[in-house]
Amino acid sequence: MLSLLLAGVLLWLALRRVDWTAFMEGLKQTRWGYIFPFVGASLGALVFRAFRWKLLLNAAGFRSKWLEVWDANNIGNLGNLAVPGAGELIRCGYVNGKSGYANVLGTVLVERVWDILFIVLMIVFSLVLDQADFGPFFSENIWEPLAGNLNFSLWWLIAALGIVLIVLLVLVFRYRGNSRFCARIADALSNIGKGFTSFLRMKRKALFLFYTVAIWFMYLLMTLSIQKAMPELSDLGLVDALFFCVLGNIASIIPVPGSMGAYHYLMALAVSAIFAKSWETGILFATLQHELHAVLVLILGAISYTRHSLKKRQQTA
């Protein structure tokens, strides 16, 4: 409920000053032929994600078929549209094997670590390639508001929570032989650790890296396709698409369902502040990119959920 409320506030901030006549005029001018490469790149990113996760699952001792991994990912993405972060937990349950849920969760954590690494690299690349435009935007609209909220007392709170967490972990493993509760938590954490280290046991690490690069290249193509679909943004290039990808992933950190509101506000802010385009152009750019992808996720998630449910019903029968 809190995440929905936050999404509503961000949507209101994004849409409150939109001239809907100008928005509809921009929508009429959209070159819809570029939507096909956008959809193709979106599918490509999802396909490569399924291949990458399957590599990790194999290294962790699971032998799930690719279609099972594909369905689990799609159903998880469907869950993320409703509750932020829930999809990562949901998809683990759909490939849960003999090694247990916690082991699968560890492989998901590995994926997220690599995704964060690539986001950081893309931030660095975008700043190096166009520091004059992107540097001030990051500083004024992202870093300074964040640093302003991270005051001295908050750092003390973070440090205290970290110390408490470390003490609890030490106690759990210290008394795992005397307490069934501590034993269950320790076993779960150990299984998560096994899944997390699955990358180290993986034989085809180069293929994993290829899939990771391919995923982010697909994201670039998605953004570039929407840029070309809009006449007002068609002069923007690959470096600008890289910046928009970085900004979109920063929006995904904000705990709202499917980045709703956060994505629209940040994209419109960037389009207007950096490229001197109208706010309506930024909202249209964000709407095309976000909603088209959301519709694709809904369709694929519904198909995968239906197929999995029918298969389970047949096995039960």
Image: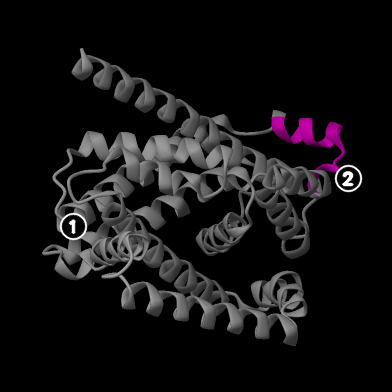
Residue shown at the point (53%, 64%) measured from the top left = 239
Image coordinates of residue 119 in percent, x first then y, are 48, 67
Residue under circle 1?
Answer: 60
Q: Spot the residue most to the front.
A: 178
x%, y% of residue 293? 52, 38
Direction from residue 147 to residue 69 in the image, left or right? left
Quadrant in which residue 46 is drawn? top left
| Between 185 and 178, the one nearer to me in the picture | 178
For this view, does 261 lie left or right of residue 76? right
Q: Position of residue 4 (x, y in %)?
A: 70, 42
Check disc 2 and report the residue beneath it.
Answer: 17
Residue in view at x 35 percent, y 62 percent: 185
- Secondary-structure class at tag 1: loop
User: Pointer 1: residues within 10 angstroms few (<14), some, or many (20+)?
Assistant: many
Taking the spot 41% from the left edge, 29% from the top edge, the residue there is 300
Q: Amino acid at mark 1?
A: Ala
Q: Amino acid at mark 2?
A: Arg
Magenta segment: does it hold 23? yes
Range of magenta residues: 14-27
Q: Is residue 75 left or right of residue 279?
A: left
The quadrant the N terminus occupies is: top right
Q: From the viewer's perspective, tell me whether residue 274 is left or right of residue 74.
A: right
At x 66% / y 84%, what residue is drawn?
A: 155
